[in-house]
Image (cartoon, rainbow, N blue to C red):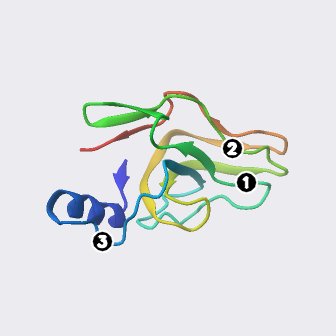
């Protein structure tokens, strides 16, 4: 699990600068994306597309429980029902927007998974842990 270069800069700004450059938290929502490859630093590599796929919205304020240096999702993160096959899904990313936006975190799932038409991809409650190292 790692922060994107964009979010590493924001973190440094929050710790050492008067105000973070280029960052405004306008709502408590985050969007989780599914990827067929490592998303890269900007989160755009290998993001799933087509077959009815869209990022899943998840609340940043109440949707996570923080312990020490990590957060875990409190509830299931559900994506829409697919109209075609998707995958194999190997990675995820966390964005600040439903489309485009800034990648905040990215990581790999412990196992890859492919989905068929009619499937509804989901991440179980406590299935996504984001850790600061």
In this rendering, would 18 be left or right of 81? left
Q: Say if 89 sits above or below 125 in the image.
A: below
Q: Is mark 2 on a helix, strand or loop?
A: loop
Of helix, strand and loop, which one carries label 1? loop
Residue at 56% x, 29% y: name it: 75
Q: How far apart are labels 3 and 1 at the CA level?
A: 32 Å
Which quadrant of the figure contains the C terminus?
top left
Nearer the observer, 133 or 68: 68
Q: Point out the tag, 3 or 1, that comes first from the N-terminus.
A: 3
Mark 2 or mark 3: whose residue is earlier in sequence: 3
Q: Which disc is residue 13 wearing?
A: none
Q: Between marks 2 and 1, how big is the CA–CA gap?
A: 7 Å
According to the image, label 1 marks what residue? 53
Q: Mark 2 points at which residue?
A: 79
Horizontal and vertical percent position of residue 20:
28, 66
Secondary structure of the residue carrying tag 3 is: loop
Do callouts 2 and 1 mark residues in contact (Cβ within 8 Å)?
yes
Disc 2 vs disc 3: which is toward the camera? 3
Name the residue at 50% across, 35% down: 63
Q: Name the residue under label 3.
A: 21
């Amino acid at each position: 699990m790692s922060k994107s270069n964009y979010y590493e800069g924001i973190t440094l700004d929050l710790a050492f600068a008067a105000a973070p450059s280029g960052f405004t938290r306008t709502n408590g929502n985050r969007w989780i994306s599914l990827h067929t490859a490592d998303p890269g630093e900007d989160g755009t590599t290998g993001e799933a597309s087509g077959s009815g796929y869209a990022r899943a919205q998840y609340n940043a304020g109440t949707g996570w429980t923080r312990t020490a240096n990590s957060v875990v999702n409190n509830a299931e993160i559900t994506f829409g029902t697919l109209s075609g096959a998707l995958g194999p899904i190997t990675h995820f990313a966390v964005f600040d927007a439903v489309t485009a936006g800034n990648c905040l975190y990215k990581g790999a799932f412990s196992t890859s998974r492919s989905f068929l038409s009619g499937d509804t991809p989901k991440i179980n409650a406590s299935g996504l842990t984001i850790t600061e190292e």
